Image (cartoon, rainbow, N blue to C red):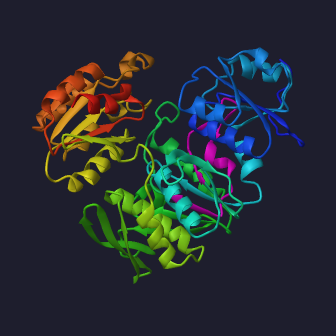
Amino acid sequence: MKPRKNSIPENVKKIHIVAICGTGMGALACMLKDQGFEITGSDDKVYPPMSEFLYSKGININKGFNSENLSYRPDLVIIGNAVGKDNPEAAAAMNLELNYCSMPQALNKFIAHGKKAILATGTHGKTTTSSIIAWILYKAGLDPSFMIGGILKNFSSNYRLGNGNYIVIEGDEYDTAFFDKGAKFLHYEPALAVLTSVEFDHADIFHDLDHVKSVFNTFISGLSNNSTIFGYDEDENITELFINKKCKTQRYGLRKDSGWLISDINISPPWNKFSVKKHGKIFGTFKTKMMGAHNLLNILSAIAVCDSLSLPLEILQKALETFENVKRRQEVRGVKNNITIMDDFAHHPTAVRETINAVKPFYPEGRLISVFEPRTNSSMRNVFQDIYPLSFDRADLICIRQPSLLEKIPQEIRFSSEKLVADLKKKDKDAHYFQDTDSIIDFLVSEAKPGDLVLVMSNGGFDNIHERLLGLL
């Protein structure tokens, strides 16, 4: 095999993107196209809405991976982290000695270069936190750029090219590419960063919690004394990681000795009202339509970040009142016969628990019906088998689906939805096991009553269960 050229040359004009239809890769393709680069791409999963969005930008997409797609010898090939070294186009890029790089490398070189980066990281909440920060900066007139792993409703997009000095990035701890097993966030040098939480996740690439912590430790250790990182105060893993670091550290959360403290929470649907203290003194009162203590903490971190940029209190207050959240985060997909169907991305046990706890007080009239599909690489493994039963305490009725992709996991380490249901029944919970989505829909059509909230949690499309339910109720 000829020498690899993992580098970005000068005077790039033509770029080919392998696995272009992913959320992040598609956003990067559009940003590069908007900057004037000639973009082509390929994917084995070319379907709406991303395919239509890319076509609308004038980007040509090849269906399937083929070495011929690189025959025009682009100046640079960007290879997604879902692509293996045996991919025909990845192999062709190396055999043809073409320059290639990862998504974070390209984002850093072409989009973030010359801007001050603000990074939101952590096991939970990084999409929401980065979205809130981006919206506040926008409302403050700072014209930010951003690239985030979810669609911001305020922008109907997960990216933006602004002319301002700041770029907001969701910092992912997942590995970068087959040729770079380091975390994606290691490619950025943020002026400001948030660390929301550190828990075990991504069981397909991390061995255990210590492995996860080591990656975050590498990230924090690499921050200079010009950088400031804000960490949630009740996460002992973060406390440990902040010891003896060069960068400036600040804490936010619920502890009285933290620099940023949330207090006086008052739930008055549709508003969530609260006060914020800075170094023990009242900083301001706020209200938001976002539900749950976890979202208030995400907001608190964003307030701390934006206050460090000297943004006026009034701007922060108005921005939070008008922030419309992120698609698939507590997103109401519709209401039929006074039955609400809500979609949420929750899949980790902590996220499932916090999401249920968050929405429950906002729907007091009826039952909270929790519908959960274990679909991630971690949730389909038995690493959380004994933890998931603790996540559904505040749900009134629970529907658990058999994982649809379970055959990808070795049998000896597979998660059991049937065992989860049995464990929930031991806790006197009204829990039910289903082998497929059709069975869940049939059950809910006959079971759901006016006033109920059906909370659907999955990181996938869940066979379009939301629209199908709304059509049948």
Kindly tell me whether residue 341 is visible in this rendering.
Answer: no
The segment highlighted magenta reads 169-195
Q: Residue at x 48, y 62 (%)?
A: 231
| Left or right relative to 328: residue 49 | right
- Work out which quarter of the rendered image holds the C terminus and state it: top left
Q: Residue at x 39, y 47 (%)?
A: 329
Q: Residue at x 57, y 32 (%)?
A: 50
Q: Residue at x 50, y 70 (%)?
A: 304
| Left or right relative to 19: residue 94 | right
Whether residue 411 is situated above or below residue 318 in the rendered picture: above
The x, y position of residue 71, in whole percent, is 83, 18
| Left or right relative to 351: residue 170 | right
Whether residue 310 is situated above or below residue 153 in the rendered picture: below
Report if residue 89 lies within the magenta region.
no
Q: Nearer the viewer, residue 301 or 203?
A: 301
| Left or right relative to 309: residue 313 | left
The x, y position of residue 465, in whole percent, is 32, 29
Q: Residue furthest left?
A: 428
The x, y position of residue 395, in whole percent, is 19, 43
- Work out which quarter of the rendered image holds the N terminus and state it: top right
How many marks do you count on the picture? 0
Q: Residue furthest bottom?
A: 281
Snapshot quadrant of residue 54: top right
Kindly tell me whether residue 103 is visible in this rendering.
Answer: yes
Q: Nearer the viewer, residue 71 or 269?
A: 269
The x, y position of residue 410, in whole percent, is 42, 18
Snapshot quadrant of residue 101: top right
